[in-house]
Amino acid sequence: MIALSLSRGSRVAYRGETYVVTRPVDLETVLAEHAESGQVERLPIRELRLVGGASAEETKEVDLAALPDEDLAEAERRYQLIRPLLEDRHRTAAAVKEVAAAADVHWTTIYAWIRAFEAVGRLSALLPPKPPGGHGKTRLDPEVEKVLQETIQDTYLTKQKRSVSQTIKEVNRRLANAGLPKPHPNTTRNRIAVLTAQERINRRWGAAAARQEYELIKGAFPGAEVPLAVAQVDHMQLDIEVVDDEERHGIGRPWLTLVIDVFSRMVLGFYVSLDPPGNTGTGLAIAHSALPKDAWLAKRGIAANWPCWGFARKYHADNAKEFRGNMLQLACKEHQSDIEWRPLKQPRYGAHVERLLGTIAREIHGLPGTTFSNPAARGDYNSAAQATMTLAALEVWLATWICKVYHIRVHSGLGTSPLRRYEEGIFGDGERPGIGLPPVETDPDRVLLDFMPFVQRTVQRYGVQIDNIEYSSDILRHWVGAVDPEMPKYKRKFRFRRDYRDLSIIYFYDPEAEAYYRVGYRNTSRPPVSIWEWREARRRVEEKGGEVDEESIFAAYNELREIEEREGLATRKARRDAQRRRDHRKADRPLSSSVAEPAAVADADDAETDEEEVLPFDETILIRERER
């Protein structure tokens, strides 16, 4: 996956012809020189593409979640070394050699890392090469990993401030006492290297020192001196009753997840739905913020400009349990972003986005069906009876208000409009240079997949099983019963991503092809269900004391739907659930043009199964179990 660079000298394709970018004109166009004729033209950014002929190495899909920790830590180390050079438009040979000396590598190696990263724009470009035959990975035995992590927690991350060398010695001592093999010292160093600076300072020096280092200054936000330096993410249940698409009856209040750029206050993206907030909604909002909006706006018939795209360097997000997980952390790492969780009971860390959410709430109070902010303000106003907007209409209203009102009116805290402030940060304002146009993501499917929750499973003769549902496809045949090449006593586990809005399809990452494939239900007669419907049906089976398996859960699901149909969607909850199903079916899906067909494989009765379960807020399962 390659991002399309728009910096000076970048080669781009426009209507089948190759051009070289000379400079950006505005947020929608660039000046570029035809590669052969030399003629300079003004080109629309939305129509630019990658120049054909990218190598397989550049276009392969690397899933960071499937990599050994050591490889990921090494890629991060390399990125941090070259990051100042990547950001310096006027980097010199002397600066490169200085970094090389600090890293104890030849200066040509630094140049090679820079070229690799700039060609792809992904952290995965800096991964160390795979040794021949797939060997050389240093994946640890789970017992060794457990001892290592425990030692880091109670030896290194303490007020005693023991050194890395002392921590390595303590790791080796504990492993020797347990009769377990010692890892290479660099393994411990790498585990410590991936700790955030804030966590190290907080645990080793105390909360006061951490606050002094990271405390927000009143009236400013550290690090947000340019666009996309810091983005804030937050959620709010909107003060409006929406109606279903068919009967136009009230079905409740939707949730909004909003992403804003702190420097300019531009809205980078959002996600609105009837689903409860969590990692899925946060991931979809961040993905929306990073992708160009032209196609998204056109699909909804919105005649407006929303000229922002690209990943922020840092995201500040809600600290609640349901928003934390490895999925978001790894997805952000791949796109050179950090995600930091706002400290509890310290709302100033999300003040900018919360103020905007408050502004949106006040605007919504003027719409039909508003619930206002409290019962006193609502009085005898019947929100459900006055409601007229569907969720889709509300989404259009939000996007229109953001693009045509909020972005172009003067912001009291800036003294100018968010759009103008954003343009100043991109192109410069006469006093300081701009950062230039950010790269354009060229593979929306992969961005969406990066921000989807995942699980690890072995491949059995019948396929795979996740949350009691069996999935199968010919694409899995090659991996049936595969043994972990580094730990032969374990079966090999593979990465499967899921869109919680529709469990009928999962996405299998093939480590040899280095690509994702869609895998459907083994029983193709099953209806699509969301994770929330599945959990409701499962609870119904458990309450009845029945055996919890795929058959019983789908039977409970069908029973619940029959009750809804029999009652004629008379209840508000039934109408809301029915509308959620319609919204889930209409949502965009990755790789929608390449559905892998189910395979006729062995019955599940005689096959081994994984016993892992995805709990309500555990959106990553990283437990390695011994196969029985």
Image (cartoon, rainbow, N blue to C red):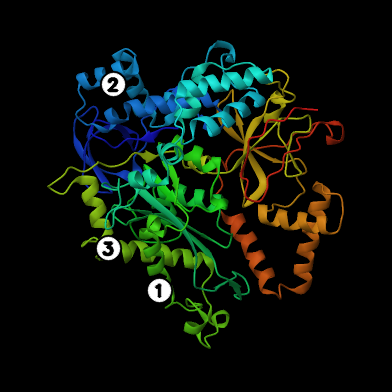
Circle nearer the viewer, 2 or 1 = 2
Q: Position of residue 587 (x, y in %)?
A: 56, 54
Q: Position of residue 25 (x, y in %)?
A: 21, 45
Q: Earlier in the sequence, mark 2 or mark 1?
A: 2
Q: Would you name the residue on which mark 3 appears?
A: 408
| Image-quadrant location for residue 18 | top left
User: At x 42% / y 46%, what residue is drawn?
Assistant: 207
Circle nearer the viewer, 2 or 3 = 2
Q: Position of residue 199 (x, y in %)?
A: 45, 39
Residue type indicated by callout 2: Val
State the quadrant of the N terminus.
top left
State the quadrant of the C terminus.
top right
SS assignment at label 1 = helix
Q: Residue 347 vs residue 8: left or right?
A: right
Q: Residue 597 vs residue 546: left or right?
A: left
Q: Would you name the residue on which mark 1 appears?
A: 362
Q: Any mark on residue 99, and which?
A: 2
Residue type indicated by callout 1: Arg
Residue 63 appears in the picture as rendered: no
Q: CA distance from mark 3 to mark 1?
A: 18 Å
User: At x 62% / y 62%, what residue is drawn?
Assistant: 580
Rendered view: 167 above or below 417 = above
Q: Earlier in the sequence, mark 2 or mark 3?
A: 2
Count the marks: how many? 3
Q: Residue furthest bottom?
A: 380
User: At x 50% / y 27%, what residue is drawn?
Assistant: 191
Q: Residue 345 vs residue 496: left or right?
A: left
Circle nearer the viewer, 3 or 1 = 1
SS assignment at label 2 = helix
Residue type indicated by callout 3: Ile
> Label 2: few (<14), some or many (≥20) within 10 Å?
some
